[in-house]
């Protein structure tokens, strides 16, 4: 391989690696931010309500009675969580940016912005698909990162939080039926 071709190949590889490193940095910033804000008292409380929401939905989907005592027994994680969507979106953006390869700074920035709606749609469909195939062990393995990230965004709720989540859920269901 002539020297200029080798140099171009190394330079091109460097840009691919740069795209990958950019994605890993994004992922690290997302996880680090969620972890750091989780120490704030108000956010801890918010994450408790998030846990109450998940427990309520899990109980509803299991056909359980929606009382705080019953709902408290259900898990904090939920396959269709917004946190799962966010992680899936970031991981998809990493894959796509690496696949797009080297490009000018203008197209690099433009692609990051212009592809958000498409990647968000794919992420939603992925979350939906995995939620409908939870019986498959491969799917359960695929969603492990999403469920793991939820350990940062949910906390065990108290009984008052569960009451609020149940009432909110029932109000939402009633509004859906009236629409």
Image (cartoon, helix red, strand yellow):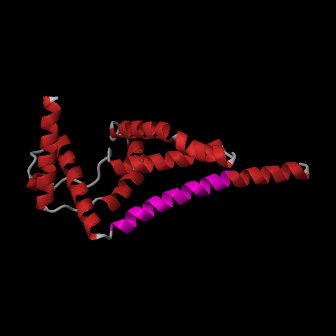
The percent coordinates of residue 55 (x first, y second) are: 20, 52
Image quadrant in which you'd find residue 17: bottom right
Q: Which residues are magenta?
A: 16-38
> Foreground: 51 or 105?
105
> Foreground: 60 or 168?
168
Q: Residue furthest right?
A: 2
Q: Identify the residue at image location x=9%, y=45%.
A: 65
- Residue 63 visible (yes or no): no
Q: Identify the residue at image location x=52%, y=57%.
A: 26
The percent coordinates of residue 102 (x first, y second) are: 69, 47
The percent coordinates of residue 165 (x first, y second) are: 16, 51
Q: Identify the residue at image location x=38%, y=36%.
A: 129
In the displayed structure, 96 sits above or below 47; it is above
User: Horizontal placement of 1 versus 83: left or right?
Assistant: right
In the displayed structure, 132 sits above or below 166; it is above
**Magenta segment, principal secondary structure?**
helix
Q: Identify the residue at image location x=90%, y=53%.
A: 3
């Amino acid at each position: 391989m002539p020297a200029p071709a080798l140099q171009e190949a190394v330079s091109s590889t460097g840009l691919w690696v740069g795209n990958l490193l950019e994605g890993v940095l994004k992922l690290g910033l997302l996880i680090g931010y969620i972890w750091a804000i989780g120490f704030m008292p108000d956010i801890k409380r918010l994450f408790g309500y998030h846990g109450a929401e998940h427990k309520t939905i899990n109980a509803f989907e299991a056909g359980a009675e929606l009382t705080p005592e019953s709902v408290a027994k259900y898990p904090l994680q939920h396959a269709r969580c917004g946190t799962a969507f966010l992680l899936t979106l970031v991981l998809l953006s990493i894959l796509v940016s690496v696949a797009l390869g080297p490009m000018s700074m203008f197209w690099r920035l433009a692609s990051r912005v212009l592809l958000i709606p498409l990647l968000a749609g794919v992420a939603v469909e992925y979350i939906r698909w995995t939620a409908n195939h939870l019986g498959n062990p491969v799917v359960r393995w695929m969603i492990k990162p999403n469920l793991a990230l939820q350990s940062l965004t949910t906390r065990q709720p108290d009984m008052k939080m569960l009451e609020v989540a149940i009432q909110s859920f029932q109000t939402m269901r009633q509004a859906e039926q009236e629409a």
